[in-house]
Amino acid sequence: MSTVENSPSTLADVLERVLDKGVVIVGDIAVNVVDIELLTLRLRLFIASASTAKELGMDWWTGDPFFAPKSVQPTAELEQLRGRVAELERALASDGVS
């Protein structure tokens, strides 16, 4: 007969497991009055480390300008667009359109 050891897990152990594997929490909250649905909230929460989320294809924050540092702005593209706008303004001015 084999014995199973039940060693106590610390909070750090549990947190490490959750961030390594990920946890999904799903819940629905509905508010009804006399069989009339007034409000429904659908909650989907995924908790994992950034590397685990990236492995699963959830890396939306990498392209979000809110999370990107200010120094990583697409300056080359911005300058190219400014040049195109200036060129269009010159073309419009030379055609006599105001």
Image (tube, grey):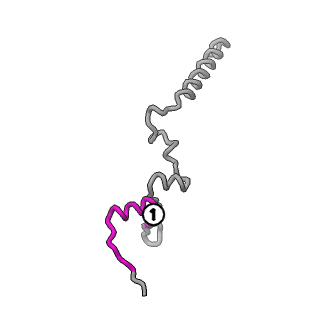
Return the x and y of residue 34 as percentages of the image width and height. 44, 72
Q: Residue furthest front?
A: 1
Q: Quadrant of the C terminus?
A: top right
Q: In this orientation, does residue 40 appear? A: no
Q: Mark 1 points at which residue?
A: 23
Q: In this view, does 37 lie to the left or right of 86?
A: left
Counting from the top left corner in percent of width and height, residue 81 is at 58, 26
Q: In which quarter of the image is the N terminus?
A: bottom left
Q: In which quarter of the image is residue 25?
A: bottom left
Q: Give me the residue at 59% from left, 20% from top.
A: 83
Up the image or down, 19 lies above or below 9; here it is above
Give, as a three-letter code, the residue at label 1.
Val
Farthest residue, direction bottom: 1
Q: Is residue 36 above or below residue 73?
A: below
x then y, percent, for residue 71: 45, 31
Instruction: Tell me what residue is drawn at x 49 percent, y 32 percent.
Output: 73
Residue 24 located within the stretch drawn in magenta = yes
Q: Is residue 25 visible?
A: yes
- Number of numbered discs on residues: 1
Report the magenta residues as a range. Answer: 4-30
Mark 1 closeness class: few <14, some 14–19, many ≥20 residues within 10 Å: few
Asked if 14 appears above or below 6 in the picture, the reply is: above
Tell me, yes or no, whether the highlighted magenta stretch contains residue 78.
Answer: no
Residue in the foreground of this view, choosing between 46 and 1 = 1
Residue 5 placed where, x, y %? 37, 77
Q: Which residue is drawn at 46% across and 65% down?
A: 26
Which residue is pictured at 32% across the width and 64% down the height? 11
Q: Relative to the observer, which residue lies in front, 18 or 77?
A: 18
Secondary structure under the numbered disc 1 in the rendered image: strand
Name the one closer to the observer, 93 or 2. 2
